[in-house]
Image (spheres, rainbow, N blue to C red):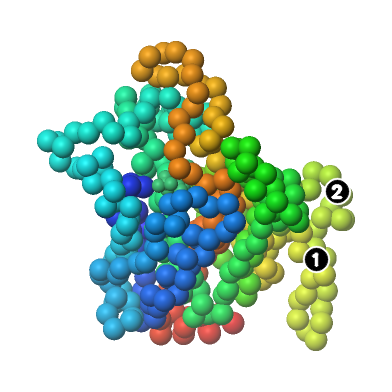
């Protein structure tokens, strides 16, 4: 069961990234400046590579919005890849233009190269790199920004922050500079928080309706994320039930909690506390000082492929997670309070309060 759903398309150095979003009711304000600001946030952070100097990601809305308001019809978003200009021959869709510049056969351990080549039968690993690249997270953030605009109408706001980079809690920039000098990369840990969520988004009645499960899937699907936890899930195995669970009390007739170890989710549903999601991102596998690997064409041992990449993209990853989680929350919100227009949803929402 899904209300807010989308598909994306596009290669890292292709012409453009595209998304079609289905299920956004009529009457929501769509602010392009807000979407572009989310895209700018994703492009930022210390440790990003050369590509971010080329691109100024901006969205073009080609359907579903008129005079700044959603129509209820599918919304199409497009982000042009400026770098395509330099890759026209390499990324041409025409059969007559076959070009092997930038082809490679030495897979990067940790990347999709090896399994992708075996799975799809590609000889040129460029065919895998282009879509497995984290470049596609740009259009995912644009979709998430639309979801955020839906949530904003009801006072629901998200944010994210870095908790650790390369094992460092404070001197991130120093650690990134040292990694750059060594030709290696760094991962890290980040947190996403959503505030003002109503009680009861998600459900306990079936495994695929549990919101914690949906969020885990979404965050794990972001390139390079290797683990996700909700609230203090990471330490849940070390403490007693008395220490872990969040006791309830009354204040002026309102149900309150002193703690939020559950991270805002109990039984796969929002419980009215802040939603807290934490995740660990591995170091990006593309490194100037490459790992040992195998050349899949020659079947010889060699060094992994290197091309322009980021030394660290944890800040970008946090923004991606924040926006991707917004999609799950908007979906659940529309499922619970849904209607065909903002007015209908507002009516349902106020009725439920
Ligand atoms: C990215 C664009 C990519 C990479 C990076 C993220 O652009 P390019 O390959 O042209 O440098 O900078 O992707 C990866 C690190 C990866 O492993 O895929 C972006 O827009 O975020």
**Is residue 113 or residue 13 the one in the foreground?**
13
Q: Residue sitting at 50 percent across and 50 percent down?
A: 49
Percent across and percent down for residue 323 are 50, 62
Label at residue 239:
2
Label at residue 189:
none
Local crowd size for mark 1, using a 10 Å CA cut-off: few (<14), some (14–19), many (≥20): some
Local crowd size for mark 2, using a 10 Å CA cut-off: few (<14), some (14–19), many (≥20): few
Q: Residue sitting at 49 percent across and 59 percent down?
A: 43
Give the mark nearest the N terminus, 2 or 1. Answer: 2
**Is residue 29 or residue 314 the one in the foreground?**
314
Q: Is residue 256 left or right of residue 66?
A: right
Would you place residue 202 above or below residue 307 in this image? below
Residue farthest front in this picture? 181
- Which SS class for mark 2? loop
Would you place residue 43 above or below residue 106 in this image? below
Q: In the picture, which quadrant includes the N terminus?
A: bottom left
- Which SS class for mark 1? loop
Percent across and percent down for residue 110 are 53, 32
Ligand 1 is within 8 Å of the C-beta of the residue at disc 1: no
Would you place residue 214 above or below residue 117 in this image? below
- Residue position for label 1: 259
Q: Is residue 211 left or right of residue 191?
A: left
Q: Residue sitting at 54 percent across and 29 percent down?
A: 290
Percent across and percent down for residue 129 are 39, 38
Ligand 1 is within 8 Å of the C-beta of the residue at disc 2: no
Q: In the picture, which quadrant includes the C terminus?
A: bottom right
**Structural distance between the alpha carbons of marks 2 and 1:** 14 Å
The number of numbered discs placed on residues in the rendered structure image is 2
Percent across and percent down for residue 287 are 54, 36
């Amino acid at each position: 069961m899904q209300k807010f759903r989308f598909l994306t398309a596009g290669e890292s150095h292709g012409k453009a990234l595209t998304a079609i979003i289905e299920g956004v009711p009529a009457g929501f304000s769509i602010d392009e400046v807000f979407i572009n600001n989310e895209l700018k946030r994703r492009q930022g952070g210390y440790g990003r590579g050369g590509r971010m100097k080329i691109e100024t990601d901006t969205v073009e809305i080609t359907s579903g919005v008129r005079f700044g308001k959603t129509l209820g019809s599918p919304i199409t978003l497009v982000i042009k890849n400026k770098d395509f200009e330099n890759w026209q021959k390499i990324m041409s869709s025409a059969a007559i233009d076959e070009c092997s510049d930038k082809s490679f056969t030495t897979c990067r351990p940790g990347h999709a190269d090896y399994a992708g080549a075996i799975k799809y039968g590609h000889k040129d690993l460029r065919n895998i790199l282009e879509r497995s690249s984290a470049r596609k997270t740009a259009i995912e953030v644009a979709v998430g920004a639309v979801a955020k605009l839906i949530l904003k109408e009801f006072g629901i706001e998200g944010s994210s922050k870095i908790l650790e980079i390369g094992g460092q809690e404070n001197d991130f920039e120093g650690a990134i500079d040292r990694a750059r000098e060594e030709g290696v990369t760094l991962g890290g840990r980040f947190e996403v928080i959503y505030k003002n969520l109503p009680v009861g988004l998600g459900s306990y009645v079936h495994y695929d309706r549990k919101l914690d499960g949906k969020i885990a899937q979404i965050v794990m699907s972001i390139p390079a994320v290797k683990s996700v936890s909700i609230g203090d899930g990471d330490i849940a195995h070390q403490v007693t039930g008395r220490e872990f669970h969040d006791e309830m009390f009354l204040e002026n007739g309102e149900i309150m909690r002193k703690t939020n170890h559950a991270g805002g989710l109990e039984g796969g549903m929002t419980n009215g506390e802040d939603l807290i999601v934490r995740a660990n991102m591995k170091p990006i596998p593309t490194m100037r000082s490459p790992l040992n690997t195998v050349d899949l064409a020659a079947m010889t041992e060699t060094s992994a492929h290197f091309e322009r990449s980021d030394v660290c993209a944890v800040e970008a990853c946090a923004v991606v997670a924040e926006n991707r989680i917004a999609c799950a929350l908007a979906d659940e919100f529309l499922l619970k309070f849904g209607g065909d227009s903002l007015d209908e949803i507002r009516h349902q929402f106020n009725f439920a309060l």
